[in-house]
Image (cartoon, rainbow, N blue to C red):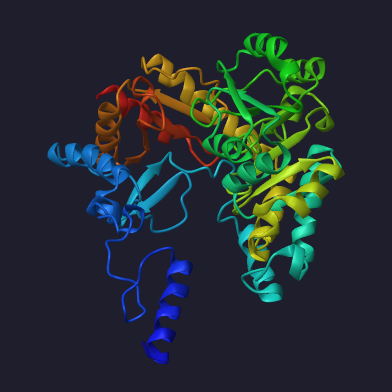
Amino acid sequence: MTQSSLGLKAKQQLIERFLGKKVGASGTAPQTSAPRSLQRAKVPEAFTRFDRHPGYEKMLVPKAAADRMGLRNPFFIAHDGIAGAVTRINGREYINFSSYNYLGLNGHPAVSQAARAAIDRYGTSASASRLVAGERPIQRELEEALANLYGVEDCIVFVSGHATNVSTIATLFGPKDLVIHDSLIHNSVLEGIKLAGSTRRSFPHNDTQALDAILAEIRHQFERVLIVVEGHYSMDGDIPDLPALIDIKRRHGCFLMVDEAHALGVLGETGRGSHEHHGIAGRDVDIWMGTLSKTLAGCGGYIAGSRALVELLKYAAPGFVYSVGIAPPLAAASLAALQIMLREPERVARLRENAARFLMLAKESGIDVGTSQGYAIVPAITGSSLKAAKLSNALFERGINVQPIIHPAVEEKAARLRFFLSCLHNEQQIEQTLKTMERM
């Protein structure tokens, strides 16, 4: 055996010890089939295409049914201008009940001018997170005005209303905590609880006795407990018993969060919201949440409360820390809208009159309005998604724009049309709409 062959043999032995297997004379491992775990599995085609996604295929079912019946898709309709009591769609004017422009401040000359002035001074964007790149005075001016509105220490503004609830709940609560909410609470709260990893429980809509009983039974199992309600329910147009909720949260050692998205500008003599309507101090509620996209004619959300709450969110809430700050023109628009709301309480009074009139006439017409209390939102419950879509289409053909709310946004038996009233609506528009519905 030559020296070279001895060297090759030693090399083979060294490789075999390293690989734990026999190798060929060339010094390479013999070809064998790879372990099953390493073999590339055949991926079903459905897992590589969005048009085969279960959610998309499920969405196509009602769409196909609507197409067969010749129903117009009521969603994502392009409006030609400002949507108030009337709107223009494809060049035609419609009486409009599908806008949150409760006090008619979107498009108000002073609000638009404030936004233009902010663009001239700051540009169209904050361009970065406020934490790392600094702030613009208009952002803090809006937060201070909102804090003063609620009579609390501070406020923080986020760029999205939905993200405000998600990020706030996920930051403040965790796996050892409980979040208990009204059964009709908004999706953003549910998503926040999911991200927090907290235990979630619901109580029947506006049933404070049930809430009290649940907490008496299970409060001791958790560290922190948060009760979440809406100040004015966007699907049903009713309000909770806030004084009773404050009593419950105190007796059981809980935090109370009130979502004011549809309450600001609607409740209270001057539109300040739930605390003004119920005659309570702002500090009696731990977390006030609201949005800027409805009464305040902008876009975004806010949390108002104690200074410690706001400081914690400013440094720890992902939806604030890792997000661009609110655009200066939007902050300026919302601040101007807030100032007009407080200066012109007659807007709130007109809204209240219009909503009360709509509710009264709807009841007289035999329309199922559910539990609406006639502050700004009145549903017309049809009992099925198909009926809601058909009625929306029929009204649209007659110059009335109102959106259907269908399953799964609500239970099938609770499908409805949802009418949003504005201070800009007049008696003729309200009466014409309800007379048209009577004839259907």
What is the quadrant of residue 413 in the picture?
Answer: top left
Most foreground residue, 119 or 410: 410
What is the quadrant of residue 244 in the picture?
Answer: top right
Residue 107 in picture, x, y percent from top left: 55, 56
Please, which residue is most extreme toward the bottom here?
A: 3
Residue lying at 48% horizontally and 47% vertically, measured from the top left: 84
Please, which residue is most extreme toward the front here?
A: 1
Is residue 336 at all visible to an observer of this figure?
A: no
Residue 70 in picture, x, y percent from top left: 15, 40
Residue lying at 29% horizontally and 46% vertically, measured from the top left: 56
**Quadrant of the snapshot with the N terminus:** bottom left
Please, which residue is most extreme toward the left here?
A: 68
Is 157 situated above or below 286? below
Residue 267 in picture, x, y percent from top left: 66, 30
Most foreground residue, 206 or 239: 206
Is residue 247 at all visible to an observer of this figure?
A: yes
Q: In the picture provided, is 77 more to the left or to the right than 263?
A: left
The number of discs equals 0
Q: In the picture provided, is 362 more to the left or to the right than 304?
A: left
Most foreground residue, 234 or 250: 250
